[in-house]
Amino acid sequence: MGIQLSRRGALRSAGVLIVSAGLPVSLDAVLAVREAAAQGVPVPPLPGQLDSYIAVHADGGVTAFFGKIDGGQGLDVAIAQIVAEELDLPAERVQVVMGDTARTVNQGGASNASGVSQGSIPLRNAAAEARLLLVEMAAGRLGVPVAALSVGDGAVFVAAEPARRLPFAELVGGRTFNAEVKWNGRYGNDLNVEGRARPKAIADYKVVGTAVPRRDIADKVFARHDYVTDIKVPGMLHARMLRAPVAGAQPVSVDEASVRDIPGARVVRKGGFLAVAAPREWDAIRAAQALKVEWSAAPAPFPDQAGLYDHIRAAPVTKRAVAMQQGDAPAAIAGAARVIAAEYEWPFHSHSSMGPGCAVADVRANGARIWTGSQKPHAVRDGVAKFLGLRPEAVHTVWVTGPGSYGRNDAGDTPFDAAFLSRELGAPVRVQYMRNEGHGWDTKSPASVQRVRAGLDAGGRVVGIQFESKSFSRTNIATSEADPRDSLASQLMGGGLNPQDTYLFPGDFVPTEPYAFPARLMAWETIPPLLDRASPLRTSHLRDPLGPELIFAAESFVDELAAATGADPVEFRLRHLREERDIAVLRAITEKAGWQPRPAGPSGMPGDVASGRGVSLARRDGTVVGLVAEVEVDRRSGNIRVKRMVVGQDCGLIINPDGLRRCVENALVYGTSRALREEVTFDRNNVTSVDWATYPILDITEAPEVVEVVLINRPDIRPTGAGEPAVRTAGAAIANAVFDATGVRLRRGPFTPERVKAAMAGA
Amino acid sequence: MSTRITFRVDGQDQTVTVDPDMPLLYALRDDLGMSNPHFGCGLAQCGACTVHLDGAPIRSCVTPTSAAEGRQVTTLAGLGTPEHPHPVQQAYIDEQVPQCGYCINGWIMTAAAFLRDNRNPSEDQIREALTGLKCRCGTHMAILRAVKRAAAIG
């Protein structure tokens, strides 16, 4: 494979560009008009204008303006393929601009694995409309009917006389289409536009479905890719935050003299918000360490961690909802020949991105510019504008690759810190958190308890099932930054709160959804947060929200039902499946894994190491995923070794098989980390898992020996979410494999050696 | 208390006047304007700040700048170029490894030093050589493929 640098990377190699000192991050010089606008207070593109989505340049190349971002899964490449397809261009002729609020319409940023499933649709429609307009322009210029024209290789030509052609560049290159498209009036994930043109039939696709390489990789490999942490603005100050030793404590007094000898160090305090800033980064770090602060005596906010799940069970319910009801499950279970019941527990998890949150803000009298790695830059614009009392149009937010993007992480708090500090200090400010904040003060995925019961008839068939989750809200902190009350800065300053009390099983994602159980009750309950504001245990979305905990419970329980009836776990599932797509994924992975039917359970072979295999199957918003895991359990240490994983995914039409394969593999390894290693720890005062030593993740020596990815392409089904679903498969398949190996059922995550050993000792 | 400290970075002599105890990471990033390596933890736990000091991988987030005096620092940018990529860089491209890529310095710089000293390593040896480095996106399998590939082409 050849080495392809981005234009930015190539410029850097030529020494033209050192850093983006105050320049817009994009370098697409052809877009001179937009660039000029971006120097002042830029005007966001209008959603009803074709030019807001597609530009044809003087050289015939095309830029697509995409109101989401790529977190490193190649979403920009998929968008380029989809746009190129409609314009009959090679994918490399389409550049993609993402996440800049002055250059892209608000499509909701990264959200719910919707990049292709929803985000690509307006881009596809706009590209189709651009093609139609190009053809109509050419028809007028060539004096032939539209029907006589074809499109290929960046030109419109007379089908019968290919030499009579007009390149895109000649038709509209460097100019605007100045055409309207019909906007559906929505912003965010649901935004769509349509023109007169009909997009291509999938059967005619040539670019979609091919393996197109990523554009950012060579730059990253040669250290030429700027992250948000690398943004430098002239005159910029570096800031660091100070955090309370006891969550909820307030600074009572601050001894500014304690940092007087640090050059340029300044202290900013408002309520519980406390920061230091200095011209040099190391000085800001030193000042944060040196600053003497007396904190208020706050009551210990948290229960003992050992009692977390009892706390959840006993806590008052603030909200209860039934996500799915079918028949009368409680009655069916009450009348069943046999009842199986189990409870599954899942801890808080941390985003713990590779780099702690970072943002740069330059707040001036006439507006603000924010550089953020948040995956929802338009929401950052709206939230910061409200926070500062500015119009949204006066805040220009530029998305720059962040150090990981897995939901509403600490990147979502830093723009508020930086903006406030920039205004207070009258200078551009770069805020970067320290490691203990990245782990200790990010939002957490909610800890939960799942209670599951099912009734079996005399023949071992399920007559009813009841699944209830009890948990902290999944959106105590909103999943976007659009409301400043969700920011740590605002909460520390005493701003009001904006908690949402939800644990909704979203869309086509109900635990045990694939199975044709005759009666079902699926319900959730939420409980109050442990600390109502600025809490290190405040809860929000983390990569595949609710997937790991709910599918761990659901698919472990289905396995328990299979075991209770003496059935092979795959055969038991097949017996209850009804949809062809679920069946196809299960068959594909079990065939690939060489699954031989037999009831799960230990072989009775002696020895210190026991082998087992387990399976899981799940849906997520239209995507089907399944996993076969083969493990070895060391009876002496309790350590689980993952020997082999065969993961299958059907997410409809495949846009880029290479990109998809890596997305699925990465999601699975990440899900394995969550299941085997991850748990936020805390004492009565604060979170105590504050770095990689106290919050272990899957080490490369612990990664599976083999991962095999099976993709099922469904050209007739619109693409659905690809980047997150496999996360949820790991927990249950591993736990089921441990049961197969040892006869011990793991019902609490993570499956650490200590916990496995204790479970075996208790069995 | 600032001190003049001179060392070579990616083949060029550089002098910084800094607190000698300041970690090398900040001298590279802030005084020499390099956008790389990265701050990940400041605790030598993750590897995002890894550079070579006289050929050995070190965590620049905990290495005092004074320790670099008179020595040779190599960063990811100096390991290879698009024209002359290091085998690990080439393998990373061939295998399309990174997701976010913020961790990349640790893996590539550690693997490059390991493969220089260990020809034909087994997969277990590669895993042991890379233990402790962090990747939060979950690209572990792609990293292993790339390092094995680099071992084969190197």
Image (tube, coloured by chain):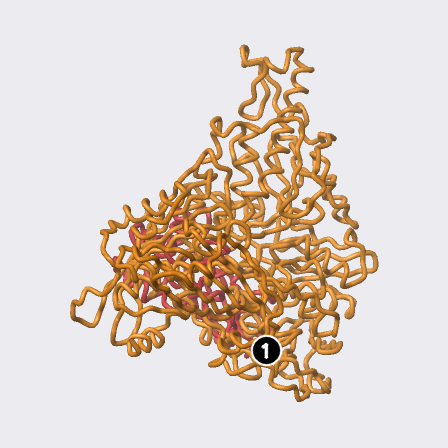
Chain colours: A orange, B red
Q: Quadrant of the N terminus of chain A?
A: top left
Q: Taking A439 as reference, is A333 above or below it? A: above
Left or right: where A291 falls relative to B126: right
Coordinates of residue A432 in the picture (x, y in percent): 62, 68
Q: Is residue B137 visible?
A: yes
Left or right: where A311 falls relative to A20: left
The residue identified by callout 1 is B19
Judged from the image, the secondary structure of the residue bearing numbered disc 1 is loop
Residue beneath the point at 29% across and 65% down: A739
Q: Spot the residue most to the front.
A: A335
- Front in this rendered view, residue B99 or A660: A660
Q: Spot the residue most to the right.
A: A365
- Front in this rendered view, residue A746 or A454: A454
Q: Is residue B109 visible?
A: no
Residue count near mark 1 (Cα–Cα under 10 Å), binned few <14, some 14–19, many ≥20: some
Left or right: where A605 falls relative to A91: left
Tell me how many marks there are: 1
**Chain of the residue where label 1 is placed in the rendered structure:** B
Q: Taking A503 as reference, is A291 above or below it? A: below
Residue beneath the point at 77% across and 46% down: A43
Q: Quadrant of the C terminus of chain A?
A: bottom left
- Front in this rendered view, residue A326 or A335: A335
Coordinates of residue A283 in the picture (x, y in percent): 64, 76
What kind of residue is marked 1? Answer: Asp
Coordinates of residue A443 in the picture (x, y in percent): 58, 68
Q: Spot the residue most to the left.
A: A606
- Front in this rendered view, residue A439 or A719: A719
